[in-house]
Amino acid sequence: MVNTDSVSVRVFSLNCWGIHYLSKHCSERYAMIGDALSKEEHDIVLLQEVWSEKDYHSLKKKLACTHPHSHYFKSGVIGSGMAIFSKHRIHDTFLYRYSLNGYPYMAHHGDWFGGKAVGMAVLNIGSLVANVYVTHLHAEYCREKDSYLPHRVVQAWELQQFVRHTSAGADVVILGGDLNMHPQDLGNRLLRSYTGLRDAYLETDVFDGCENGITLIAENPFINKRELVPFEQGIRIDYILFKGSSKTKIYCDSMSTTKGSVPDHPFPYSDHEALTAVLRLEPHTPNETGRGMQSKDQDSAAEKKLAELVDIVTEARTEVKVGLHCAERMRYTVARSGLMGLALLVLELAIAAVPWLALGEEQPFPRVSFYLLAALCFAILLTAILLYIFYTMELKSLQGAEDQMRLAVGGLQEKLRGFPVAQPHNTQCRPPEGQDPSAVDPVE
Amino acid sequence: MVNTDSVSVRVFSLNCWGIHYLSKHCSERYAMIGDALSKEEHDIVLLQEVWSEKDYHSLKKKLACTHPHSHYFKSGVIGSGMAIFSKHRIHDTFLYRYSLNGYPYMAHHGDWFGGKAVGMAVLNIGSLVANVYVTHLHAEYCREKDSYLPHRVVQAWELQQFVRHTSAGADVVILGGDLNMHPQDLGNRLLRSYTGLRDAYLETDVFDGCENGITLIAENPFINKRELVPFEQGIRIDYILFKGSSKTKIYCDSMSTTKGSVPDHPFPYSDHEALTAVLRLEPHTPNETGRGMQSKDQDSAAEKKLAELVDIVTEARTEVKVGLHCAERMRYTVARSGLMGLALLVLELAIAAVPWLALGEEQPFPRVSFYLLAALCFAILLTAILLYIFYTMELKSLQGAEDQMRLAVGGLQEKLRGFPVAQPHNTQCRPPEGQDPSAVDPVE
C-alpha cells in the first residue's frame, strides 16, 4: 500500500520548561535535550518555553550539523520561548501574537510577560511546501475556576484563524506545541474542527508512550502531583496536529512520547513529555483527485461537520461573553476606585485649603498625613488609569473576537442552508428606527 | 478587448478623521459621507479613523440598503477605527495588530491608543474569492526627524507578510487605506515589491483627481498648510492597491479622488481626500494560463525584481537596526533613571535611619521633605520599571522583525542564485568555537 513517492517526516515537540533559577536542573536538561536531538535527527523540532535566547543559541550551535536551519520567535518581554529547528531550509517566517494573554499584574503566573503567540515557518520538504506552526497557549492554573478561560478560547480562535488563512498555499500543514488544553476542551475542538487539523495521537497506527497519550504525567519528578487532581494519572496538553491538501495526502505512521524518565539520566528532559510523530506524505494520484465529486454520504457527513462547527463556535462565543462580562465588571471596579481616589484627593485639598483661606497661618491638617494621603490618592488614581486602559483593551479584543465569531456563525449557517442566499436588499432596507443596528442582521 | 465574463468592482477608501470634539464638523461630515456612500453604491467601502463605534453603527444603519454587509475591526483602546462596508457577503474576517505602534506616553499623537492594525475580510464577488484588506499605519509627524520611522517600517513589513501569507487562496486581492507613506517611501516599496500589489493610481487608464494623485492637499480647509512643507501642493499617502491570481486578471479602468471641496457643501468629507477605483476582473483564458512557461526575457525581469527586493529588504533591515539602537539607548536611559531613583531612596532611608539609630529621638531629617522625597523616588522607580518593560517589548519586536528580514534576504538570495542549494551539512558542521552562533549562517 505504501506509495513509492512517499516522504517520511519526523516531527518533535517539547515544552522545555527553561526558566533559569526557577526550573530545576535547567542547564543539564538543555544539554540532554541537545544531545537527544542531535542523535535522533528529526526533520522538524518544535520547542516551547525556551525563555532564554542564550539557550536557543547554544542549541543552535549543537544542532548546526543535524538541523542547519532554525528560527527563534521573539515576542513579549521574555518570549515567545518558541523555537524551530529544521533539516529543511526555512524560507520564510511569520509571527502572530495573541491579542489576549493574561494580566501583567499576575506576574507570578508570568504568561503575560511570555508574549504567547503562534509562529509559522515555511519550508520545502522535497518539492512540497510545508507550513509548520509552533504555539504555546496560556496556562491553566485552576481548572475549576479558570479565570483565563476566555483568553485561552480567544487564543484558540485566533490560532485557527491564523492557520486557516495562512495555509491555503501549503501542501502540508504541521502544528506542534503546548496548547494547555485537554483533548476535548472547547478551544481544542474549535481548532481541530475549523482547520481540519488531525491529532497525531488519535490518527497514529502505532503508539508508544504514556497511557492515553498524556504529556503531563504524575510520575514526572518535576510535577507537583496535587496540581494534577482530579486527573491523578496525568493530562494530555501537548499535541502534534497535521493536515494535507488537495495535492498531498498525509498519514501518521507512528507516534511516541517519553515516559518520564530518560535512560542513563537521573531526571527527565522537562516537566512535560516530549512528542515524536512520524508522518508520511504521499501525492494524490490523478484519479483520486478526480474523485472530487461528492456522493450523498459525503454531503451528509460534511453537513454534520458543519453543524457541529456551528455549535462549537456558538459555545466559544458564549465563553467570550462570560469573559466580556468579567472584564466589564473589572473595569467598572477600577473606574470606581479611581474616582474614589480622585474624590479623596479633592476632599483632602479642600480640608487643607479651607482653614488656610479662612484662618490664615493656622494649619490644622498635619503636614505628614497630608502628604502621605496625597501620595496614596495619586497612586490609586494612577494605578486605576493604567488598569482602566488595560481592561479597555481587553474588552476591545474580546468584543472583536465575539464580532468575528458572530459573523463566522452566520457564514457557516448560510453554507449549511446550501447557499440559498436571499437578496438582502428587500428584507433589510428599513431597519426599525431606534432598534440596535447590530440586531438588524445577526450575521454582521 | 473587454471580456464578456468581466466583473466590475468599485472600491472606495477614505480616512474619515472621526475624532469627536477634536475633528471639525465631525457629525456633519459623517452625514455627508453616509449620503455619498448610499448614493454612489460602491461595491466595497474601506474606512479609516472611524474612532467612535457609534458612528460606525449609524453608517451601518444608513447603508443597510446599499451595503448590507459590514464589519468594524476592534483594536487598541479606541480603535482600530477601520470599517468595511460591502455589497457582497463577508464570509470571514481576521485582524492583525501591528507589534509596534508608537508609545503610550505620546498621548497627544494618539497612535498607540488607536491600536493600528490590518483587517481582512473574505468575500465572494460572483464565483471569485476576494481578500479585501483595510489598514492604517502610524502617522508621520515630522519627516525630517521621524522617530516613528522604524515602527512604520516594521508595520509595512508585517503588512506585506500578512497579505502575502493570507492571500494564497484568493482570486483577487484588494488593499485600501491610509499608509502614511509617500509613494516612494521604503515601506511602500517593500509592500508593493514583496506582495506584487499594484497601485491603482499608477495603473489606471483614466484618472480624475488632484495632481499627482495627492490625498492630503493644501486646499483642504482642515489641513494646516505649514505641516505639508516642503510639499506645498500636498502628498499622496492614501492608496488602493490590488492584484489578481493565476485564475483572475485584474485591471484598473478608472480612478478618481475628491478635490477638497464637495458640491453643495461648505466643507469636504475629511482632511484626507477620498479615493475611488473601478477595477475590472477577468478570468484567465486557458491558453493564457498555458503560457506559463517563462521566456528568457521574463526570467531576466523576474531576476531583476528579485534583486530589487533583496535591496529593499536590506534597506528595511538597516532602518530597523537604527530603531533597535534608539530603543536600546532609551531602555538604558530608563534603567539608569530607575537605578538613580532606587539609590536616592536607599540614601534617604539611610540618612533618616542613622540619626534615629544613633541619636534616639532626635530627627534631623524634616518629615515632610522625607515623605515627599520618598514619594518622588517611588514614582521615578515605578515609571522606570513600566518603561523598561515597554522598551524591552519594543526591542523584542524590532529584533524579531530584523531576524525575519535576515532570514527572508537569505531565502531570496538563494532563489536569486537559481536554487543551487549547497548541502549545508559539510560547510556548517563545525562552527568556530567562541564565535557568535548567529554569525555561523547569516541566513538563519
Image: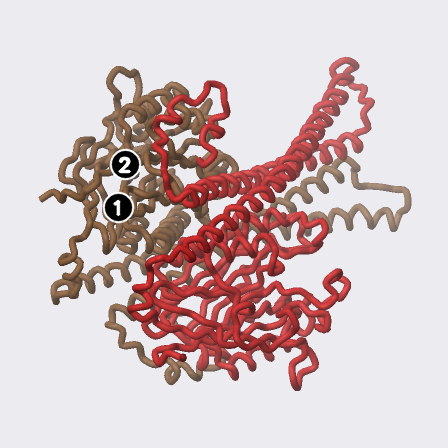
Chain colours: A red, B brown
Q: Which badge, 1 or 2, is on the more N-terminal residue?
A: 2
Dot 1: what SS? Answer: strand
The amino acid marked with disc number 2 is Val
Q: Picture coordinates of residue A154 (x, y %)? A: 55, 48
The residue lying at 36 percent from left, 41 percent from top is B134
Viewer-proximal residue among A82 and A213: A213
Q: Picture coordinates of residue B401 (x, y %)? A: 42, 57
Viewer-proximal residue among B128 and B40: B128
Res. A439 visible in picture: yes
Dot 2: what SS? Answer: strand
Q: Badge 2 sits on which subunit?
A: B
B225 vs B191: above or below? above
The disc at residue B242 is: 1
- On screen, residue B63 versus residue A205, left or right, reads left
Figure quadrant of the N terminus of chain B: top left
Residue B411 occupies quadrant = bottom left
- Proximity of marks 1 and 2: CB atoms separated by less than 8 Å: yes
Q: Picture coordinates of residue A310 (x, y %)? A: 50, 46
Res. B105 visible in picture: no
The residue lying at 68 percent from left, 28 percent from top is A339
- On screen, residue A414 versus residue A262, left or right, reads left
The residue lying at 75 percent from left, 25 percent from top is A348
Q: Picture coordinates of residue B114 (x, y %)? A: 47, 38
The amino acid marked with disc number 1 is Phe
The disc at residue A293 is: none
- On whether disc 1 and disc 2 are found on a single subunit, the reply is yes
The single residue placed furthest to the front in the displayed view is A296
Question: Residue under circle 2?
Answer: B11
B340 vs B67: above or below? below
